[in-house]
Every structure is written in C-alpha cells, then in structure tokens.
Image (cartoon, rainbow, N blue to C red):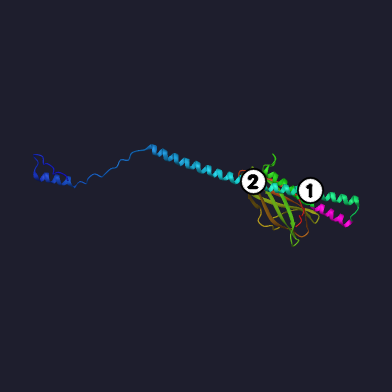
Amino acid sequence: MRPDPVRPAGIHDEAFAMSNMRSSSRPPPADLAVMPHRPQRERSLLALALCAVILAGLIGWGVGRVQTQARAVTLGSELDALVEQHAALLAERDRLEVVLGEAQVAQRVDTGFDDHVRTTLTEQSARIAALEDEVRFYRNIMAPEADGDGVQIARLELMPRIDGRGVRFRLLLAQSARRREEVSGHVELHVLGERAGSAEVLEVEDIGAGRYPMPFRFRYFQDLVGEIDLPEGFRPEGVQVIARGVGADGFRLERTFSWQMQEV
C-alpha cells in the first residue's frame, strides 16, 4: 500500500489535492522481462540439425547400396544357373554324337533311328546356341567389356501372329550393372523391305503397332513388346531400331536386324 504523499510547505490544500489525484490516476509501469542471450545454445541446436541431415543422407546411401548389391547377387545366381544348363546340354550333345558315331560304324540300326538322332542333335544344338546367347547377355551385364559399358540394343525377336497378317515383336534394351544411373528415352522402329519391286521403309506408327515412339525407362534392362501389321504385298527384309536417350546423356543408338522369325 502506497504511503500518502507529503504536502510541501507553501502549497495550498486545493493545489496539493489536484496534484495528488493526477499522480494516483497514472497507470503502473508494465512488467518487463529480460531474456538472456545464449549463443552457445543456438550453436548446439544448429549442430544437432546438421548431424540429423548428414545421418539421413548416410541412411539413404546405405539403402541404395544394399539394393544394388542384392540385384547383383540375383543376376549372378541367374548366370550360374544358365552356365549349369549350358554344361548339361553340351554333355548331352557329346553323348548323342557318340551314339550316332557308333550307329554309323556298326551299322546295327536302321535309317529311322539315325534320323531321330540327327533331329535330336539339331534341336540340342539350337538350344545350346540360345543358351550361349543368354550366357553372353548376362555376362555382359555382370562383367562388361570396356566398350560395352553403355546402353545397348541387345536383341529383337519376331514371332508370327495368329492371324498370319503380321508379327509380334520383343525388343530387349540393356546396360551394364556397374552403371547405376537410370536411363530413359524412346525407341523408333523402321521395317525395311520391298513392294512391287521397289524398296520401301515402313514406320511402326504407319502400320499400327500401338504407342509410338515407344518409351523406355530402366536401370539394368527392359523388354518392349508390341505387334506389327504388314500391308498387303509388302515383303519385309529387316528391322531398323533407333533408341534415343533424354536428359544429360542424350545418346542415339541404331541397330538393324534381319527379318528372321522365331519358333512359337
């Protein structure tokens, strides 16, 4: 409780009362809080945030490395399985060749059996060639040569359609396993042939094979499939494949395949 103000000498009662009323009507000063400045605490918080960002980056890098190593292990297992199949087929072919040689020398079997053995050998040789192609493909992905480190137009397969008017195709694009960057772009197809005695080039867009150009996006390899309708009177001779990359690479690849149908 405030003490009553003392009236100075020589001041009248009315003047003193008015002065006392003005002083009592003034609002009390507001409470002010003084916050201490702590630069050490701010530096600690900044260092903690920087450590969290670095830790998140290390975790992301570790997850990506583990996924890449797992994919490499899977490709290695597939390569080992193909090598075993290849070795087994080679052994079977050698056995059949021995049987055929003995049959021819001893002349103890008829012509029908010889034909059967020859047919079997032909089928085994075709399977061996296909497996050798698969083995080369996977070896190129796992341990590519110096000039095989980029994107490749690896393979094109053509199969007859049921209606007999066109073909189904399967195009394989691949790149080395040690290239971990994802690539993207599009592919154009041109069918080379002749009609009415004149050379002619048909684009897949013109003969109704679906979306064109065909987009791709992959890290190791990708299959592109579709159908090609051939116009009446056109005789195909080959397929020209052009792959164009987008982004920083901006590559352009071109490869021409002969028109060779695969067995269904």
- Separation of marks 2 and 1 at Cα, in angstroms: 27 Å
Q: Residue furthest bottom?
A: 163
Q: Which mark is residue 262?
A: none
- Residue at 67 percent of width and 52 percent of height: 223
Say few, some or many: other residues with alpha carbon within 10 Å of mark 2 (under 14 / 14 to 19 / 20 or more). few
Residue type at tag 2? Val
167 relative to 182, above or below: below
Front position in the image: 99 or 141: 99
Q: Provide the secondary structure element on which disc 1 rests.
A: helix
Asked if residue 211 is positioned above or below residue 147 in the image, the reply reads below
Label 2: which secondary element: helix
Judge from the rendering whether residue 40 lies leftward or rightward of residue 182; answer left or right: left
Q: Nearer the viewer, residue 100 or 10?
A: 100
Residue situated furthest top in the rendering? 40
Q: Which residue is mark 1?
A: 91
Amino acid of disc 1 = Ala
Report the side of 83 relative to 105 (left or right).
left
Task: Tell me if residue 222 is in the magenta stretch.
Answer: no
Front position in the image: 124 or 208: 124
Q: Name the residue: 9% across, 45% down.
A: 13
Residue 114: say if magenta: yes
Disc 2 target residue: 73
For the point 82% across and 49% down, which residue is it?
A: 95
Which residues lie in the magenta part? 110-123
Q: Is residue 182 visible?
A: no
Q: Residues within 10 Å of mark 1 (few under 14, many from 20)?
A: few
Q: Do we see residue 112 in this rendering?
A: yes
Q: 182 and 74: which one is in front? A: 74
- Tell me residue 242's x, y (percent): 69, 48
**CB under 8 Å between discs 2 and 1:** no
